[in-house]
Amino acid sequence: MLKRKEHISQIIVTAAQMRDIEARIFAAGMPVSALMEKVAGLITRRIQDIFAQASQQSTVTLLSPQAGILVGPGHNGGDALVVARELHFSGYKVWIYSPFDKLKELTSQHLQYAQSLGIPCYQDIEQLPNCDFLVDGLFGFGLERTITDPIAAAINQFNLWNKPIISIDLPSGLHTDTGEVLGTAIRATYTLCLGLWKQGLLQDQALDYVGKAELIDFDIPLADVQAVLGNAAIKRITSATALSTLPLPRPPVTHKYKEGHLLLICGSRRYAGGAILTALGARGSGVGMLSIAVPESLKHLLVSHLPEALVIGCPETETGAFAQLQLPERTELSSFSAIAIGPGLTKDATSIVQEVLASDRPLVVDADGLNILAQLGTIPTLQKRQAATILTPHTGEFARLFPDIADAKDRVKAVREAAARSGAVVLLKGARTAIANPQGAVWINPESTPALARGGSGDVLTGLLGGLLAQGVNKEIPVEDIVATAAWWHAQAGILAASERTELGVDAFTLSQYLLRVIAGQW
Ligand SMILES: NC(=O)C1=CN([C@@H]2O[C@H](COP(=O)(O)OP(=O)(O)OC[C@H]3O[C@@H](n4cnc5c(N)ncnc54)[C@H](O)[C@@H]3O)[C@@H](O)[C@H]2O)[C@@H](O)CC1
Ligand SMILES: [K+]
């Protein structure tokens, strides 16, 4: 059983779902004002911690830091006003920017009380004094239309101040579900997301605005979450879930075939390195047995890099691409636990992709394998496969496979539709990789690094995923969990490598060497 905190940190909600969950809490008797008080108290404490830490690291000690509090018309503004009051009482110098004439009732009451305490309140940005940091309570999940002037101009101005900004719930201006910028948006240094993770904070287009995001858990009952979300949930992949899916510990009595036999089909003379990187990713997975089918002229190269693998040289075309898949005698595709196909294939390998699709083995299709699928237009026939199919496109490959649903503005929606249509588990690569299964469940990898935006890093993922799949199939681990674990592991290896070698130091070979270090400390 997952602990409550762990469970809560996995959940992702839309604005509508958050509103429904909130409504259940209020209907059960929790007063709105009491919840606001509780939440804003938690935010205040976190702001104080952040600021205390920053002061410790700085050579200048501020005796009474000055906070600018930005207040919108709804309950996000109400939260901000409670924070203003609490910071005021704990010795901060506080001023309030409240540009709206009409406020929700609770927000209006808090404003009135803050003013009665003598906290200065301004309506125009020109009047605002200097400050050490800003608290953004302009809009939360109630933002429903594009922000216009004068608020848009004020937000742009705040962004130019170059002061730390702490956004309450989400940076004002971001769409709660898609992360789209509605006109303009606050560029936060920290986002303190309230209660449950909002989907928009995990969409690629929001990342420039979100800063460092944290969840402020205010004890939402899990029963209310379950009642609203049901099973078609969107989940954040966490270390705890990923680690629990790894094929560890191994049973004391086992043998190499029991620990999975992966067949990789990859490479061409032109893209020889892709085959090596895919194989190194598979090696990192710990798979029991690795067979690698490559065009004949690559065989020695692969053997010299991976002496443990069984390398199968296949007939090749004049240009050194696969002409045919020729497995050793008495070996069928069904002899393997799983197959991964694609990196470095070239488009000459069309018939091999078809052959593999017709097999009854769990299958990962990547890179040129996906381009061949797009050309063949066979996406609907994937539904008929007897075993799981996993597609791992980057944005360009996704657009070729699903031209009518590729949607940069809502990647979660796009990946969900792609999975439903294809019957495959689809992993859409990005800064926040999103994974969907055909039943509508989605997983998002919440931590990654731009260091991974580099040729060959996808090949490592394909091998790693294939290797985990081969091991997981034997242990009856759900395919979606394996895909999520591979995405997490790959990203964590990138993060660890970047932390030691900078974001420029994570070439794909190096990445493959960091895989094991991610988990070595955990077991
Ligand atoms: N979900 C929860 O359980 C809790 C939510 N709380 C806070 O409440 C927030 C949601 O509050 P609200 O529903 O009042 O929504 P918001 O505070 O996000 O703002 C909605 C208000 O902004 C106006 N508005 C929307 N778009 C606008 C635009 N483009 N230009 C000008 N005005 C615009 C709306 O008419 C409405 O008055 C959360 O983000 C969070 O900060 C907390 O107080 C406590 C608990
Ligand atoms: K906000």
Image: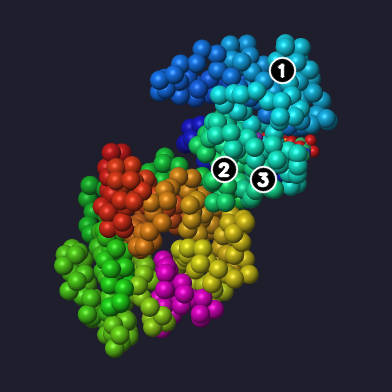
Residue 192 visible within the image:
no
Quadrant (top left, top right, bottom left, bottom right) of the C terminus: top left
- Rendered residue at 50%/22% (across/down): 51
Tell me residue 139's x, y (percent): 70, 36
Quadrant location of ligand 2? top right
Label number found at residue 209:
2
Which residue is situated farthest in the right direction here?
A: 102
Q: For mark 1, give the secondary structure.
A: loop
Tell me residue 222's x, y (percent): 60, 34
Residue 266 lies in quadrant: bottom left
Side of 419 relative to 391 (left or right): right
Crowdedness near tag 2: few (<14), some (14–19) or many (≥20) residues, C-alpha within 10 Å: many
- Near-viewer residue (298 or 50): 50
* The residue at label 1 has a CB less than 8 Å from ligand 2: no
Crowdedness near tag 1: few (<14), some (14–19) or many (≥20) residues, C-alpha within 10 Å: some
Q: Which of labels 2 and 3 is toward the front?
A: 3
- Near-viewer residue (484 or 211): 211
Q: Is residue 344 above or below residue 166?
A: below
- Near-viewer residue (253 or 332): 332
Q: Which residue is mark 1?
A: 120
| Residue 261 highlighted magenta (yes or no) | no
Label number found at residue 184:
3
Label number found at residue 281:
none
Residue type at mark 1: give it: Pro
Q: Is residue 19 above or below residue 360?
A: above
| Residue 356 highlighted magenta (yes or no) | yes
- Rendered residue at 22%/57% (across/down): 255
Q: Which label's residue is closer to the chain start, 2 or 3? A: 3
Q: Which label's residue is closer to the chain start, 2 or 1? A: 1
Q: Is residue 77 above or below residue 370?
A: above
Q: CA distance from mark 2 to mark 1?
A: 28 Å
Q: Which residues are magenta?
A: 351-377
